[in-house]
Amino acid sequence: MSAFSRLWHRAPAWRFCLYMILPFTVLTLIFPPAYLIRLIPRLTALSSSIHNRLGMHDAPAKGEGGGDGNGEDGVITMMPITDRLTKAIPFAGRILPLPEGTWHPVMNIINGPHGEVLENVLIRVEGHVVTGMIGAEGSTQPVPETAITSIDSSCHDDRNYMSRVLTAHPPSMECWFTTAVYPASINRTAIIANRLREEGFILPPVLLKAGWSYSTPAGDHNVNVETVTIFLNPVNTDSTKMLRTPDYWAKDTLGQQPAASDFVKRTNTWMAGWAQVLHDGFNSDMLASSDEQRARLAHDPAASLPGRGSPLD
């Protein structure tokens, strides 16, 4: 018996490691880490080819005809939109709580010079209409303080319906806000809209935007950071379905539209409570509130009524 044969029979751990070489090699080719892509640029083309065969089509990044117009770099991967996500998901090494309903992944984006920023885009649909969309962006490792100098700028916009600064002791910062936006102003609008159109879904003509930002010091002038932006469909209810133009949702004239004003007030109240749940998720402390409390706080004003479903359910 050769030395190799004796080792094969007497070292099960070593044998197991040999078995695992193949699956780990396959995973590396499908999801190559950023540092390996920099060392072996050809991995990008190989990974994209594998994604195409698996139905995980990579969207074009900056300068490749993506047409999103936001000027951001990033490796964008389209996700299986039929996946069903509820309550909370792992995100950037932390926990991302989800509002009420079933959410579906649209895309993942890896940003940063070392792939240290992760972004997820999720949607919630009723019938063929989007009732909610989430854009979550978080650091998977500490980033320089200088990279987030304007992270709270949206919380100080005069066009906001409401905003609250919860912590303002740089580099620690936490705030939230609500405002009205239009689909064309959302990052990567073209890519998102094209993907939704392929699946037979449409974005409403106006969205209510609820944003939350949080940063904590990580030493050596670095921070851990996360921003969560939630877009709610305000024109999917009986009382607001006719208010489909931007003029109805302008802050200055909101008082002239009781139905719109009521939806905004309910969104403000909801976000005030949901911001604390997002804070607990950032700290991976979901025991800070009970399941009953989170279920109550998760009910946003655009959540589907009982009995109304989605083609993806």
Image: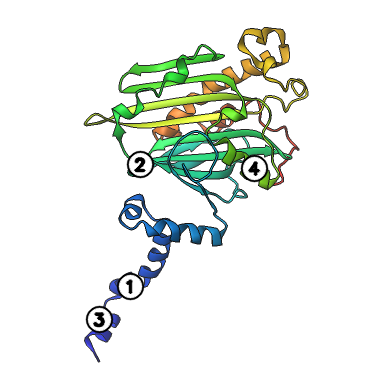
Residue 194 is situated, as x and y percent measured from the top left of the image, at 63, 43
Between the residue at mark 3 and the residue at mark 4, the CA separation in whole angstroms equals: 55 Å
Indicate the quadrant containing the N terminus: top left, top right, bottom left or bottom right. bottom left
**Residue depicted at x 74% and y 40%:** 127
Closest to the camera, between mark 3 and mark 1, is 1
Closest to the camera, between mark 2 and mark 3, is 2
Name the residue tied to disc 3.
7
Q: Which label's residue is closer to the chain start, 3 or 1?
A: 3
Q: 125 and 191: which one is in front?
A: 191
The residue type indicated by label 3 comes to Leu
Q: How is the image coloured?
A: rainbow
Circle 3 residues within 10 Å: few <14, some 14–19, many ≥20: few
Q: Which label's residue is closer to the chain start, 1 or 2?
A: 1
SS label for mark 1: helix
Name the residue tied to disc 1.
18
Closest to the camera, between mark 3 and mark 4, is 4
Name the residue tied to disc 4.
196
Residue 23 is situated, as x and y percent measured from the top left of the image, at 41, 66
SS label for mark 4: helix
Name the residue tied to disc 2.
116
Circle 4 residues within 10 Å: few <14, some 14–19, many ≥20: some
**Residue depicted at x 32% and y 52%:** 38
Circle 2 residues within 10 Å: few <14, some 14–19, many ≥20: some
